[in-house]
Image (spheres, rainbow, N blue to C red):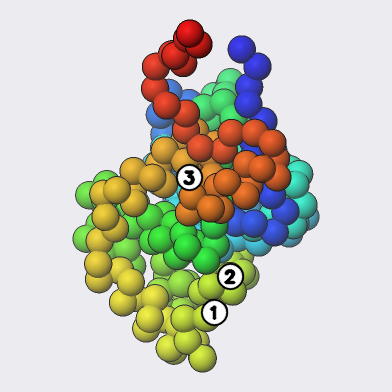
Amino acid sequence: MPRRPRIILPEVPLHIIQRGNNRQACFFADEDYCFYLDWLQEYSRKSGCAIHAYVLMTNHVHLLLTPKRKESAGNLMKLLGQRYVQYINRTYKRSGTLWEGRFRSSVIQQDTYLLTCQRYIEMNPVRAGMVKHPGDYRWSSYGVNGQGDPSKLLTQHRIYNDLGQNSKERLSTYRELFKHELEPGEIDRIRKATNGNFVLGTSRFQEEVGTMLDRRVIPGKAGRPRKKM
């Protein structure tokens, strides 16, 4: 069965997940995380991707970005993946693949789901039981988005900047969002959309994208289609 082409739209936010092969670890030491972030910064600029949020977990990565061109995200992940795998194989005297096939992605309706997706990404270490607060996890963008840490990697999205008239207001408003847990239904929608390469947004937004691309952009109904009488 041929692989379904990814849904990627220029200048529309994209949530990406890339997992370690067989869910095995892809980060082994602090230096690995640092090198990955350095190369993410380098290749995001070269490929034309604005990075808004990220979290580097032990065996997978989440990125929230806006691609400038249709091919920008694919180019980023190819360059970043190749460089990082070469580094890991050389450093740890291993060979073969590190990542689990193709990365998975979901187009995000920015006005409705961008901040929800950012919260989902930055709360990953808390949901995994690794820390009690997202600010306690070193390898995520919460330190920048929620605490004002300096960063050359991140580009704040317009939706984030609209949270306040200045940096202090934006940080305060953003932190308030984390006082409330995401609804299980929201978490499930984000996971299904990203794992299935579908569009995350309102029904109207999904319909507009589906019409524009002339393809299905939401999960289909389970089971075989009914036979016509």
> Quick one: 193 or 84, which is closer to the camera?
193
Q: Of marks 1 and 3, which one's residue comes earlier in the chain?
A: 3
Would you identify the image quadrant in which residue 181 lies?
A: bottom left
**Residue 174 left/right relative to 75:** left
Q: Position of residue 193 (x, y in %)?
A: 47, 41
Q: Residue at x 48, y 45 (%)?
A: 61
Indicate which label's residue lies in the foreground, 1 or 3.
1
Q: Which residue is mark 3?
A: 61
Mark 1: few, some, or many residues within 10 Å (few <14, many ≥20)? some
Residue type marked 1: Asn
Whole-angstrom CA distance, mark 1 to mark 2, is 6 Å
Q: Residue at x 58, y 20 (%)?
A: 96
> Quick one: 185 or 74, which is closer to the camera?
185
Q: Which residue is mark 2?
A: 157
Q: Secondary structure at mark 2?
A: loop
Residue type marked 3: Val
Residue type marked 2: His
Whole-angstrom CA distance, mark 3 to mark 2, is 20 Å
Q: Which residue is mark 1?
A: 161
Quadrant of the drawing holding the N terminus: top right
Would you identify the image quadrant in which residue 8 lies?
A: top right
Mark 3: few, some, or many residues within 10 Å (few <14, many ≥20)? some
Give above or below for 155 relative to 212: below
Whole-angstrom CA distance, mark 1 to mark 3, is 24 Å
Q: Residue at x 66, y 43 (%)?
A: 211
Tell me, yes or no, if residue 198 can be seen here. Answer: yes
Asked whether disc 1 touches disc 2, contact meaning CB atoms under 8 Å apart, the reply is yes
Q: Position of residue 143 (x, y in %)?
A: 42, 70
Q: Position of residue 104 (x, y in %)?
A: 54, 36
Q: Of marks 3 and 2, which one's residue comes earlier in the chain?
A: 3
Q: Residue at x 63, y 22 (%)?
A: 3
